[in-house]
Image (tube, rainbow, N blue to C red):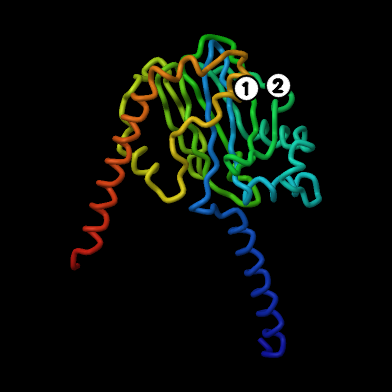
Amino acid sequence: MDVRLSRPLAALLLVLGLGSARTATAHAPVSNLYSKYEATTAGDTIAFVFAFPTRAILPLVSTLADKTVDRDDLASYRALFSGYLFERFTVSNDGQPCEHPPQVAQLFWDDPSNHALAVTKFVCRSKLAHLTIRSRLTHDMPVAHELVGDLRHGRALARSFFSAEDAEATIDLTSLTPGAPPSEEDARRSARPGVPGPERRFEDLASRVLGIDLREDTGGDARGRRAVWLMVAVIAAAWIVVRVRSARRPA
């Protein structure tokens, strides 16, 4: 092949290769960035309060609106954001899809938590028992990252993680035990830098969307929840110590 022809061809192939690389990594997840939801069950209904960091929510809403959106203007794009959320976040109970309203109940910037909050609920067709929650919510954002979910069912708590590789969580509510320690895997994942803690910060918002006062149920098991997550911290610390010692051992 003539060298004078191969150089432009090589340049073209290089440009195409770079373009493909950019496309492949456009949604590479940010490892130290996390969103979270607090879910609360009541009868056949589950309330969800999502908390999104600035780095994730503002680029998303700006992309959806095709304009730069400030945090103070988030509420104006509730309908637009609702379409995005409900296309990528679903709940089913015993294999039957649970229904959601046309729009989230609230979308606003919350200064105390320094997060954007979205509040909604899912109503299921039968008594809550075996939940399947699927989410592509945060991985499809312009800044892709992991979602951590904490669900409260009576006095029991369950934590779930949603990533690009694992976008589905199954929760058997009938087997949840109040005060039960988390699995070793959950403790390890919760110990990663930046993962949100287990604190329930938005019970008042869940109370409003459910139409009940959840605060009456929180006092009796507060000590139990603290004990459980103290155990999480101990397990996580032990795991970190083992990893550090292993790294220091000579090959």
Nearer to the camera, 56 or 83: 56
Label 1 sits on a secondary structure element that is: strand
Rendering quarter of residue 120:
top right
As measured in the structure, the alpha-carbon distance from the residue carrying label 1 to the one carrying label 2 is: 7 Å
Is there CB contact under 8 Å for labels 1 and 2?
A: yes
Kindly identify which numbered label has been placed on residue 159: none
Quadrant showing the N terminus:
bottom right
Residue under the image location 79 percent in, 37 percent down: 76
The three-letter amino acid code for the residue at tag 2 is: Pro
Nearer to the camera, 223 or 73: 223
Is residue 142 found left or right of 177 in the rendered image?
A: right
Label 2 sits on a secondary structure element that is: loop
Q: Earlier in the sequence, mark 1 or mark 2?
A: 2
What is the x, y in percent for residue 21?
60, 64
The three-letter amino acid code for the residue at tag 1 is: Lys
Seen in the picture, residue 15 relative to 229 is either above or below; the reply is: below
User: Mark 2 = which residue?
Assistant: 101
Is residue 13 found left or right of 44 in the rendered image?
A: right
Q: Residue furthest left?
A: 250
What is the x, y in percent for residue 88?
63, 35
Is residue 246 found left or right of 220 in the rendered image?
A: left
Q: Could you classify mark 2 by the number of other residues whose Cα lies within 10 Å: few (under 14), some (14-19), or many (20 or more)?
A: few
Residue under the image location 81 percent in, 51 percent down: 67
User: Mark 1 = which residue?
Assistant: 121
Q: Residue furthest bottom?
A: 3
Q: Could you classify mark 1 by the number of other residues whose Cα lies within 10 Å: few (under 14), some (14-19), or many (20 or more)?
A: many
Quadrant showing the C terminus:
bottom left
